[in-house]
Image (cartoon, rainbow, N blue to C red):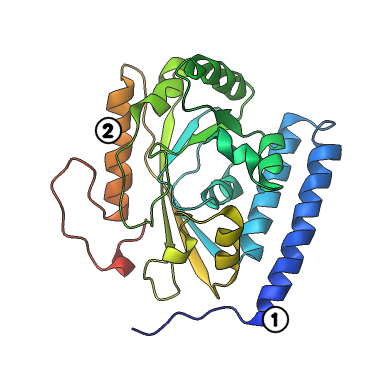
């Protein structure tokens, strides 16, 4: 197997420098601009910043399908913390995330100020609070995203989706847009370096910056109309559609023959 090209020292230095500048830009925007501009302008700034971040990390984003409309929900398979920004390059999206993300250095503060909705997994009563927050966000025209696997994978499998995470969609009768995410090397093979896994945030960031070139494939799949459906039905539909688009077996189903990765494009 031919090893995939890594970014040279000079390129990594440039990327780190640009990233630092971009983070400072985010801090200024969130502290100075966000409190003073309209919700529409905040969404526009969020999309611009996300698109710039993905580009400077050396990720070539390729999008298929119809982006979600305002006031809807997005459900995606979860590989990397970059998933959030890849989706937001297309449609500014406020993701539901575990409360631990708030503790990440700098990134946690940025996520909180940018509108991330934090949930305390250990508290069942937190569901009602999240439903209220999601309702307010949807009414304002925001798009709300979630990762129903509840954790990240290497991108080579789909974990069972947690139906409880779809409760806000049912409670707010919000259309759900499944999204399939896959990271590849230039030759079409799966890029495992993008996976968050057991790494710390800074370790993951450093590993990503060392990659010479990565393609992120983002596919917006046919949306789910939730009227008349329960959260378990919505969960099963979203899980099957995402798994099918990625050419991966859906948890609980019979194993399928997976085609060559270069043909399993979302």
Classify 10 Å Cα crowding around label 2: few (below 14), some (14-19), many (20 and above): some
Element under label 1? Answer: helix
How far across and how far down the image is residue 164, in percent?
38, 25
Q: Which residue is mark 2?
A: 236
Q: Earlier in the sequence, mark 2 or mark 1?
A: 1
Indicate whether 140 appears above or below 207.
above
Indicate whether 41 appears above or below 106.
above
How far across and how far down the image is residue 4, in percent?
45, 79
How far across and how far down the image is residue 235, in percent?
32, 31
Badge number at residue 247: none
Give the position of the C terminus as an image quadrant.
bottom left
Q: Is residue 188 visible?
A: yes
How far across and how far down the image is residue 108, in percent?
66, 42
User: Quadrant of residue 9 in the image?
Assistant: bottom right
Mark 2 and mark 1: span between their CA atoms? 47 Å
Residue displayed at 68% across by 57% down = 52
Residue displayed at 61% across by 30% down = 142
Indicate whether 140 appears above or below 223.
above
Residue at far bottom of view: 2
User: Quadrant of residue 16 in the image?
Assistant: bottom right
Element under label 2? Answer: helix
Badge number at residue 10: 1
User: Quadrant of residue 202 in the image?
Assistant: bottom right
Look at discs 2 and 1 and give the one toward the viewer.
1
Residue displayed at 71% across by 74% down = 13
Classify residue 25 as left or right of residue 155. Answer: right
Q: What number of labels is visible?
A: 2
């Amino acid at each position: 197997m031919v090893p995939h090209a890594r970014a040279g020292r000079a390129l990594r230095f440039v990327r780190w420098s640009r990233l630092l500048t971009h983070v400072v830009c985010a801090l200024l925007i969130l502290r100075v601009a966000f409190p003073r501009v309209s919700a529409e302008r905040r969404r526009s700034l969020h999309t611009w910043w996300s698109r710039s971040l993905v580009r400077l990390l050396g990720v070539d984003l390729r999008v298929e399908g119809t982006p979600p409309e305002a006031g809807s929900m997005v459900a995606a398979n979860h590989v990397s913390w970059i998933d959030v920004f890849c989706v937001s390059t297309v449609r500014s999206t406020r993701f539901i995330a575990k409360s631990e993300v708030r503790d990440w250095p700098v990134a946690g503060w940025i996520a909180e100020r940018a509108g991330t909705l934090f949930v305390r997994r250990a508290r069942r009563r937190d569901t009602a609070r999240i439903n209220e927050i999601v309702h307010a966000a949807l009414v304002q025209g925001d798009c709300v995203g979630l990762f129903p696997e509840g954790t990240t994978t290497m991108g080579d499998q789909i974990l069972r989706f947690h139906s409880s995470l779809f409760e806000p969609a049912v409670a707010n009768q919000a259309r759900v847009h499944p999204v399939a995410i896959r990271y590849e090397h230039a030759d079409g093979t799966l890029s495992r370096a993008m996976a968050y896994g057991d790494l710390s945030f800074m370790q993951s960031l450093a590993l990503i910056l060392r990659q010479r070139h990565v393609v992120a494939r983002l596919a917006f799949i046919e949306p789910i109309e939730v009227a008349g459906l329960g959260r378990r039905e919505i969960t099963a539909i979203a899980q099957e559609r995402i798994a099918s688009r990625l050419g991966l077996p859906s948890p609980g189903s019979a194993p399928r023959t997976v085609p060559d990765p270069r043909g399993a494009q979302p």
